[in-house]
Image (tube, grey):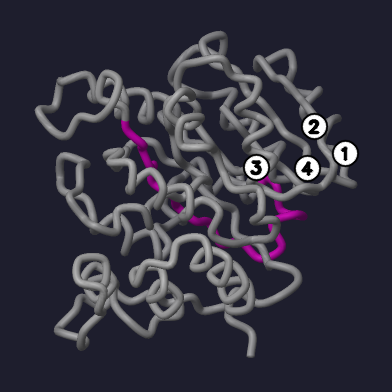
Amino acid sequence: MILPVHNQAYPLSLTLGGFARQTISSVSFRLIIVDDGSEEPVGAVAEAYNGQLRITYIRIPKSGRAAARNAGVELVDEGLVIFCDADRIPRPGFIEGHVKAHGQAHGQTGGQTHGQQGERLSVGQVRELYIPDPQHKRDLVLQRFEQGKYDRIPQFCRLVYRLFRDDGLTDSAVAWIAALSGNMAIPARLFRRLGGFDEQFREWGFEHLEFGYRAHLAGVPFVYAKEAVNVHVAHPRRGASYAEYIRQSHAYFYRKHPHPVIGHFQSFMMGRISRLQLEAAAATGIAGEAGIDHPDDYVRILNFKP
């Protein structure tokens, strides 16, 4: 388990509580917490759970999420690497859901295979819990998390999950947009062969999707691990708007991969073209005209700043 964290000591404590209640024994997995130059007492939070979990805590200078995740994987020799963000509380079956998705890769599903023993990249189910001022309402956050009826799948994730069939597999030419690293798993050796996350991405952005795009180009199958659920405790985002982060991150993404589908990706993320048009751009280089699309085929991010 790799958890990058920067100044999220409070949500990290909630997330570690979730890992202490997994359906598999805590001795069967290790949590690597990578403190990305935090000013908050992240190390103290990690230490508080040492008696319940096998935790390795490391601290690096502030370098960004891509570098933090890579630093965590450097401590892993082999096996399955599962990524979870520090502000995403895992449900009890989170780890087991990813493990099962990769266990099925060994010829058990009759689906796609790739590389060594059917290696694949799994994406879990992200849900979101909205509570005003969650920092000061720990009991309410935990109560609603336990009840499981107040969280929901965010709109972008609903769009992404529509790429997958009932068996969890997909043939979509844009499956890489599902590589959401806050809930994702991949064999360590495959991660290294793909080159890890690009550390030129330092702010919030597309480092995870760029990694997914490279995985897609390499022919790696994607699978939706529906039972691997974690719940994001929603919080205000500081700094630039999503729109500005998207513009900045896309510019680098497109310079690195000057394919028409990446060129059209910014318009997709801004809600100007649909998922079907993005798939058309992947196949033909042209997004084409908008057709009769499902409403969830358009990205709707509501917290853009003007």
Which numbered circle lies on residue 45?
Answer: 2
Callout 2: few (<14), some (14-19), or many (20+) C-alpha neighbours within 10 Å? some
Outermost residue toward the left in this view: 110
- Badge 4, how many Cα within 10 Å: few under 14, some, many 20+? many
Name the quadrant of the N terminus.
top right
User: In front: 193, or 22?
Assistant: 193
> What is the spatial separation of the Cα atoms under label 2 and label 3, in whole angstroms?
12 Å
Q: Look at 62% across and 49% down and name the residue there.
A: 141
Location of the C terminus (image quadrant): bottom right
Mark identifier at residue 36: 4
Residue 234 coordinates in the image, percent (x, y): 60, 59
Q: Look at the numbered discs 2 and 4 and tell me whether their residues touch, using CB distance below 8 Å.
A: no
In contact (CB < 8 Å): disc 2 and disc 3: no
Question: Gap between marks 4 and 1, in whole Å?
Answer: 12 Å
Q: Is residue 40 left or right of residue 266?
A: right
Disc 3 to disc 4, how far (Cα)? 11 Å
**Residue 148 shows which numbered tag?**
none
Marks 3 and 1, Cα distance to the nearest angstrom? 14 Å
**Residue stretch rendered in magenta on the structure:** 120-139
Residue at mark 2 to residue at mark 1: CA–CA distance = 7 Å
Q: Secondary structure at mark 4?
A: strand
Query: In the image shown, does 193 or 86 lie closer to the viewer?
Result: 193
Task: Identify the amino acid type marked 3.
Answer: Ala
Q: Nearer the viewer, mark 4 or mark 1?
A: 4
Q: Residue at x 90, y 47 (%)?
A: 39
Circle 1 residue: 41
Q: Is residue 178 left or right of residue 172?
A: right
Between disc 2 and disc 3, the foreground one is 3
Give the residue at mark 3. 86
Which numbered disc flags the more N-terminal residue, 2 or 3? 2
Labels 4 and 1: the sequence-earlier one: 4
